[in-house]
Amino acid sequence: MRNKKPPFEITNAMIDHVAEIAELVGRLISMNQLSANPTLRRTNRIRTIHGSLAIEQNTLTLEQVTAVLNGKQVLAPPKDIAEVKNAYEIYERLDELDPYSVDDLLTAHGIMTRGLVDESGVFRSKPVGVVDQEGHVLHFGTLPQYVPDLVMELLDWVKNSNVHMLIRSCVFHYEFELIHPFADGNGRVGRLWHTLLLSKWNPAFAWLPVESIIHDRQQEYYAAINGSNDAGGSTVFIEFMLSAIKASLMGAINASDEMSDVKVDTATFRWNKIQEYLKTHDYIMNADVRELCGVSAATANRILVELVSAEKIVKLHVGGHWKYKLVQ
């Protein structure tokens, strides 16, 4: 039967999380930090890749992952380096993927596991037991002959359900791990697809490292999967994942706030210095600002231009030099 609803309950905790996440996303977008800051976006993407691969026992540190993606030589197992490069390639193509397409899911798996597993870009042909990082069997994956139909059914449900996408994406993540459609790489592809679904609800999620939050809370992640397995539905897992997404957003907002505070503090500090100087001098020049604020000539010029624009000082040509004085 198509579009059969996977087993889960919508709880008050979920509804609260969804409302809070929607509000946090609004705040993050209003700050405009992610779209205006490619460096922050790249840092988040690297954290995402490091977090997702570290869950799967990839040995590279965050610094090594950064070095690999900057084209530097890193002394590490070739398999771990290949995992980083493959993961980066598919995350960079996130906006080209259709989250409801089986073909795109297989393509993503093919890139994520290129050169690393025999059955790359195809559903598995053998039965599999799903283990946690300690090697305990969590459950046995779906028999291989049923995998393609179940994955198609799950994607159809995600596409057509009227449940909020925040909840739907978590249901997908859990059910995907339960089916365990691939011989290897299920965790990585499941988390990638979760991010993809969230990014279709709101593009900010393409840059938010939900994976690194899961990495920080790995024991809880597996406990939530186990709890859902025991209960026969994904309710426990959905609640955990929504709390992880909320934490990720709060972290991104705090980082943006800190960046804004630093800018404000620096500007205030410089203006105070200039004001103090102009209490005892009629004019200030570029060279004075350089000395007072410990900045280059170009930065001193930018500070002065901004203060003129803000109508705090005026620019005058005196004795063959550009000088500045307080607005009277």
Image (cartoon, rainbow, N blue to C red):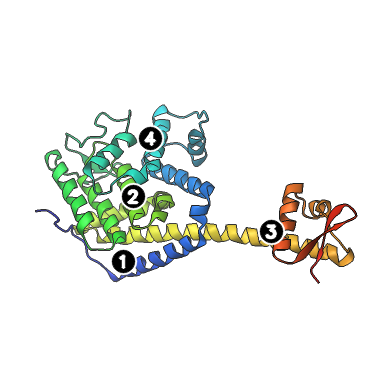
Q: Confirm or deny contact between disc 4 and disc 2 (CB under 8 A).
A: no
Residue that carries the numbered disc 2 in the rendered image: 196
Please determine whether, in this image, residue 82 is positioned above or below residue 284: above
Q: Nearer the viewer, residue 91 or 299?
A: 299
Residue 85, x across and y down, in percent: 41, 34
Label 2 Cα crowd, 10 Å radius (few <14 / some 14-19 / many 20+): many
> Residue most toward the right?
319
Residue 222, x across and y down, in percent: 32, 51
- The image quadrant of residue 17 is bottom left
Label 4 Cα crowd, 10 Å radius (few <14 / some 14-19 / many 20+): many
For the C terminus, give its image quadrant. Answer: bottom right
Query: Sequence order check: which comes first, mark 3 or mark 4?
Result: 4
In the shown orientation, is residue 256 left or right of residue 220?
right
Q: CA distance from mark 2 to mark 3?
A: 38 Å
Residue 101, x across and y down, in percent: 23, 45
Q: CA distance from mark 4 to mark 2?
A: 16 Å
In the rendering, which numbered label is found on residue 266? Answer: 3
Task: Kindly identify the amino acid type of the residue bearing the numbered disc 1.
Answer: Met
**Residue at screen point 88% across, 64% down:** 282
Residue that carries the numbered disc 4 in the rendered image: 86
Query: Sequence order check: which comes first, mark 2 or mark 3?
Result: 2
**Residue at screen point 27% across, 68% down:** 11
Residue that carries the numbered disc 1 in the rendered image: 14
Q: How many marks?
A: 4
In the shown orientation, is residue 207 left or right of residue 276?
left
